[in-house]
Image (spheres, rainbow, N blue to C red):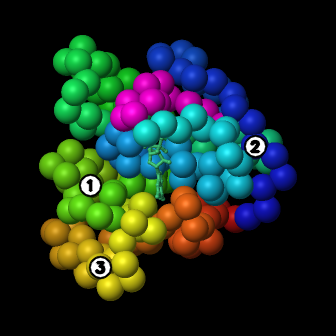
Amino acid sequence: MKVRNATFVVSAVHPSQFPRDEGAEIAFSGRSNVGKSSLINALLSQKGLAKTSSTPGKTRQINYFRINEAFYFVDLPGYGYAKAPKRERANWGRLVEPYLKKRETLLGLVQLVDARHDPTESDLQMVAWLSAYEFPFLIVLTKSDKLSAKKLSAQIRRTGRILSEWGDLPMVSFSAKSGLGKDKVWKWIETRLGD
Ligand code: GTP
Ligand code: MG
């Protein structure tokens, strides 16, 4: 995909604020701090379009980015941040669940998992939910630059085994730092967009 332009559209806290033009969209989900916003910036070759932070819980709204005036990337708020106040955790459910269930223009979801660790309980809940709804999703093992090649391939196998309950899921290892996996993630997105 040649990214000719990418612009921030809206930071939505309510479905009434979502774009209404029926443009196709791809969403990015995962626990707080796993690297969703960094993955979006890497795919778009932009540094600070999606705001990133080393403090978990940076993205709290549903953020829309318009690409090539053709489709959207949707940066979802992270889940599973233990220190988040209860009210905020309830907010995540109120905002994200109806989005995933009802958004008809959502054509695929990129589900991030930290390459250094096994999927968390919340990651597994997401995968179970996405599989139950037969929703198309790609698992991306991110921050893979933080592992040696040997440890990374062991963790890929391990994660594959853990997730095998839901079949042979497509999985890509990725690094926002080195760009590893960027082409593969784009390829999956292009297929979902029907290019
Ligand atoms: P929330 O918005 O809080 O849910 O977090 P997020 O999932 O959007 O994570 P974000 O992209 O803000 O990244 C969190 C931290 O991880 C930042 O300090 C990033 O620089 C770092 N990070 C993200 N991806 C990578 C990666 O592939 N490699 C390395 N080394 N660091 C990364
Ligand atoms: Mg973020």
Q: In this orientation, which residue lies closer to the viewer: 1 or 44?
A: 44
Residue span colored magenta: 55-65
Q: Nearer the viewer, residue 100 or 159?
A: 159
Residue at (26, 54) in percent of width and height? 127
Residue 29: image location, x then y, percent = 41, 45
Q: Is residue 9 above or below residue 68?
A: above
**The quadrant where residue 137 appears:** bottom left
Q: Position of residue 1 (x, y in %)?
A: 73, 64
Closer-to-camera residue (33/3): 33
The residue labelled by disc 2 is 6
Placement of the C terminus among the 4 image quadrants: bottom right
Q: In which quarter of the view is residue 21 placed?
A: top right
Amino acid under disc 2: Ala
Predominant SS along the magenta part: loop
Residue that mark 3 sits on: 151
Disc marking residue 178 = none
The residue that label 1 is drawn on is: 127
Residue 101 visible somewhere in the drawing: no
Q: CA distance from mark 2 to mark 3?
A: 35 Å
Residue in the image at 19% along x and 52% along y: 120
